[in-house]
Amino acid sequence: MKRIFTMCLMAATVLLSAELRAQNRTVSGVVTGAEDGAPLPGVNVVIKGTTEGTATDADGKYSLSVPSSESILVFSFIGLKSQEVTVGNRSAVDVQMETDVSQLSEVVVVGYSTTTRQAFTGTAKVVDADNLFRKSVSNVSKALAGEVAGVQVINTSGQPGTEATIRIRGFGSVNGNRSPLFVVDGVPFTGSLNSINPADIESTTVLKDAAATAIYGSRGANGVILINTRTGKGKDSFVEVEGQFGTNMSLLPRYDVITSPEQYIGLSWEAMYNEGVGSGETDPTAYANANLFSANGIDPRNNMWNVANGGELIDPVTRTVKPGVTRKFDPERGEDYASQSVPISKDFQAGSI
C-alpha cells in the first residue's frame, strides 16, 4: 500500500511539473519611441514583482520567458514614461514609449557630464528656451534678466544691440575680470553675444558656486553660463516662421513740465523781472521788457512772436503772453516724437531644407 501511494505521489509531481513548464512561454517584441518610431536600445523589461528581466538590443528588440498569461511586463528607461503591459495570450508585445518631461527636468548638466537634481550638490539654474523667447531682446544676456535668483543683469546702455553686464558671484575676482565665463555647446566662448541668435538656444544653465564651476578653474571664478543650442532632429524637411507684434507706449506719469513756448517766455520775463528787483532797478518791469530779448536774456533770434520787445509781448500784471499775440511759426514738439506710441515687430525664419 505504501509503495502504491509513493508511486501516485511521484506521478502527480511529474504531471504538475509538466503543467508548469507548459505555462512558461517566450514573449518577444520591439520597443520604439512614440515621437519618431525609432527603436530604443537599453530599455529595461522586467516581470513585475520579480527580479527576472532583460534589456532591448541595438534594434530595440527583446525576448523574455514569462510564467503565465497574468504576468505583467514593466518597461522603463531614463527620461521615458514607464509602462506596464499584461501579457495575456500574446506572444509578441510591442511598446511605444513617450518622453517623460518631469524626469527630463530633473537632469542637470555639469561640465562634461550630467547628473540628477537629487545627486547634484552645487547651485545651478536651468532656463528653458521658452522663457528666453518670450522676451523681445537682441541677445541672451538681456534675456536672463529676472530668470535666475542671485544673478544681476545690468543694462548699461539703451542703445540697440548692446550687451548687458552680468554679475553672478559678486564684485571680487582673482584675475581682474568680473564677467562670467560663457560656454557654448561645451566650448568656452569669447566672442560677442550678439552673434548668437536667441532663437537657436535650446536651454541655458547658470552655474553659480565653486562645486559647479570646478572643472573650469580660475576662468569660472565669476560663475559660468552654459548655452546649449538646438541640434538636428530626425524629422522631415520643414520651414518654420514665427513672428511677434506689439506696441511701445508711455504709461508712466509725467512730471509737470513746460508745455508751450508762451509758458517758457513768460517764466523768462518773470526771471528777468526778479533780476531787476535784486539788482536794485527802480523800474523792474521796464528792465525786464528791455532785456528780455538781449544778450542778458533770450537770444533775439529766438523771438518767434510778431513783436519787437518784451513790453509788447508780456502782460506785467499776469506775467504771461498778452492775448492776441501771434507766432511767426509753430515749432515741432520733441516730446511728441519721443513719447508717442510706436508699433514694433519681430519675425524670423528657422528650419531646414
Image (cartoon, rainbow, N blue to C red):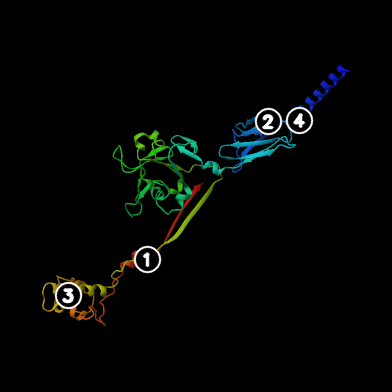
- The answer to which of marks 3 and 4 sits earlier in the sequence is 4
Query: Label 1 belongs to which residue?
Result: 340
Disc 4 to disc 2: CB gap under 8 Å: no
Query: Label 2 belongs to which residue?
Result: 64
- The answer to which of marks 4 and 2 sits earlier in the sequence is 4
Q: CA distance from mark 4 to mark 2?
A: 14 Å
Query: Label 3 belongs to which residue?
Result: 273
Query: Label 4 belongs to which residue?
Result: 23
Amino acid type assigned to the residue bearing label 1 in the image: Gln
Q: CA distance from mark 3 to mark 4?
A: 114 Å
- The answer to which of marks 4 and 1 sits earlier in the sequence is 4
Q: CA distance from mark 4 to mark 1?
A: 82 Å
Question: Which numbered mark, 1 or 2, is in the foreground of this view?
Answer: 2
- The answer to which of marks 1 and 2 sits earlier in the sequence is 2
Image coordinates of residue 32 in percent, x first then y, are: 62, 38
Instruction: Identify which residue, 137 or 238, lies in the foreground.
Output: 137
Instruction: Identify which residue, 42 or 87, lies in the foreground.
Output: 87
Along the horizontal axis of the image, is 104 left or right of 280?
right
- Residue 234: quarter of image: top right
Q: Dot 4 surroundings within 10 Å: few (below 14), some, or many (20 or more)? A: few
Image coordinates of residue 110 in percent, x first then y, are: 45, 36
